[in-house]
Each structure stands twice: as structure tokens, then as C-alpha cells.
Image (spheres, coloured by chain):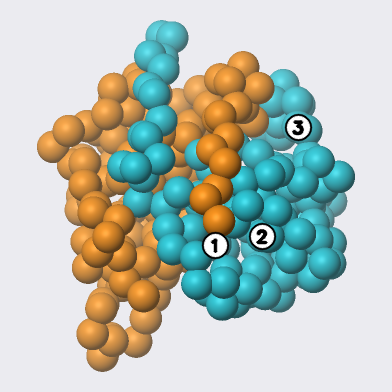
Chain colours: A orange, B cyan
Amino acid sequence: MVPIPILPATDADAVYRLHVFCCTNERPSTHRRGCCASKGSRALCDYMCRLGMASGVRRIRINHAGCLNVCEHGPVMVVYPEGVWYKYETELDIEEILRSHVIGGRPVARLQLRIDPTTLHG
Amino acid sequence: MVPIPILPATDADAVYRLHVFCCTNERPSTHRRGCCASKGSRALCDYMCRLGMASGVRRIRINHAGCLNVCEHGPVMVVYPEGVWYKYETELDIEEILRSHVIGGRPVARLQLRIDPTTLHG
């Protein structure tokens, strides 16, 4: 069955204007796909949460999330409603994504991850 | 600064056509706001993950998430890119949201949660 597209909520209706999910899934170190937690995602997500709260900007939310299933690219986050994906590695990356995209509305091209949906695992 | 709205990715570009996040945050039982985990969200989210995988439908994803900060309404989930929120309590609720909305593209009005963003905590 072909799903019927649903229009996103308008900005005014949305609970969160921008909602960020950082994969913080942890797998055993021997797992062949690796995991975002082993690449520092938990501390970096916590850092982004703290920065977001400290910004005082309302209606943005940063969350930990389970496995986003693009482990090979990790650590990854996705920003909704746009569905923009990022790979981040440092606190500077986090600061730039938060300041430029989440608060300023300008995606960060240098960190953006383009994932071909046909290559998804499983 | 007023953020610049960004158009959502088109359906064809999106990594996941629909991406569901269930709050599975746990707080001490004495916490005044309660938590989704104490209301069964973890098992129900796991159930939704299993059903989603068993459906064989590609480019949908069900994830656990940290606190979505609408604890009073829990257990809650949010479906992106639409930004539709649900309160769910039973496996039947989960089955209906998965079958009707996530797979079929028809939101489930009886379970939909309308949250006034001006009432958000903190």
C-alpha cells in the first residue's frame, strides 16, 4: 500500500519547532557495525542538551535516542521536522549545529550526512 | 533572532519516511512529574519496534527516546516529520498507530495528543 503523505504541522502548531535526536545506542565492542556510544555520542549529546537549555531558546528540544540504524556513519543525529542528518565528532561540531541550525535555522553543510535510503541496513 | 524556516526533506529524499520516537525516560517514583517508563512505555515501544520490523515496510523507524518533556501526558510518542503526538496505553493502541498512521498514512484521531507549546515545562 502506498502511504498517503501528511503535511507537517505548521511551525505555530508544533510542540517543538526543532527536535534533535542523537543516537546514543551502545553495542558490545565486538559488534561489526560499531555504535554511536563508542564514538562519544553520549557526552556530546549531553553537551548539546546543556547548551540548548543555556541558550534560553524555547520550543527546541535535544534528545538521546536509541539506534538510528546508520551506525556506520556515527555518531549521528537527525533534526526534525526537516529530517536533516549530521555526523558530529567534537564539541565544536555540536556548538555549530546548535547555533547555526537549531537556533539560527541555517543547516551546517560541512557536517551534513547524506544517506541513501536504499542502503539502509536490514 | 527569528529562525528561518527550512522546508522538510521531500518524501523521496528522507532516510525514514516516518520516524517514531517513544519516550522511555525513567525517573524516581517520587518525582512529581512522573515518567513514561513508569507507565509501561518501554515494553510498549519494544512491541511497536517488533511490529514495525515484522511488517516488512521499509523506511519506517521506531525508536526509544529520552524525556520528551511532556511527562504529564505520558506515555507519549511523536511521529516525524509530521510532528504528530500520541498518548498510548495498550498494545491495541500501538497496533492502531502503527497500522493506521505509520504504515497507512492515516493519523489516529482518538489517540492524538494536542499539546499547547506555551504550556511546556521549563
Circle 3 or circle 2, nearest the eye:
2
Which disc is residue B98 wearing?
2
Q: Position of residue A17 (x, y in %)?
A: 53, 27
Report the side of A93 relative to B92 (left or right).
left
User: Which numbered disc flags the more N-terminal residue, 3 or 1?
Assistant: 1
Disc 1 target residue:
B62
- Which of the 4 quarters of the picture holds residue B66? bottom right
Q: Are marks 3 and 1 on the same chain?
A: yes
Q: Are the residues flagged by discs 2 and 1 in contact, CB closer than 8 Å? A: yes
Q: Position of residue B51 (x, y in %)?
A: 62, 73
Report helix, strand or loop for mark 2. Answer: helix
Distance from Cα at disc 3 to Cα at disc 1: 21 Å
- Which residue is nearer to you in this view: B54 or B22? B54
Which disc is residue A107 wearing?
none
| Residue, far left | A110
Chain letter of disc 3?
B
Instruction: Give the residue type that dot 1 points to.
Output: Ile
Assess disc 3: are there few (<14), some (14-19) or many (≥20) residues with their C-alpha within 10 Å of its C-alpha.
some
Distance from Cα at disc 3 to Cα at disc 2: 21 Å
Chain letter of disc 1?
B
Q: Position of residue B14 (x, y in %)?
A: 36, 45
Q: Residue at position x 39%, y 24% from top? A: B7
- Which residue is nearer to you in this view: A14 or A92? A14
Report the side of B64 relative to A85 (left or right).
right
Disc 3 target residue:
B115
Circle 3 or circle 1, nearest the eye:
1
Report helix, strand or loop for mark 3. Answer: loop
Instruction: Give the residue type that dot 2 points to.
Output: Leu
Report helix, strand or loop for mark 1. Answer: strand
User: Which numbered disc flags the more N-terminal residue, 3 or 2?
Assistant: 2
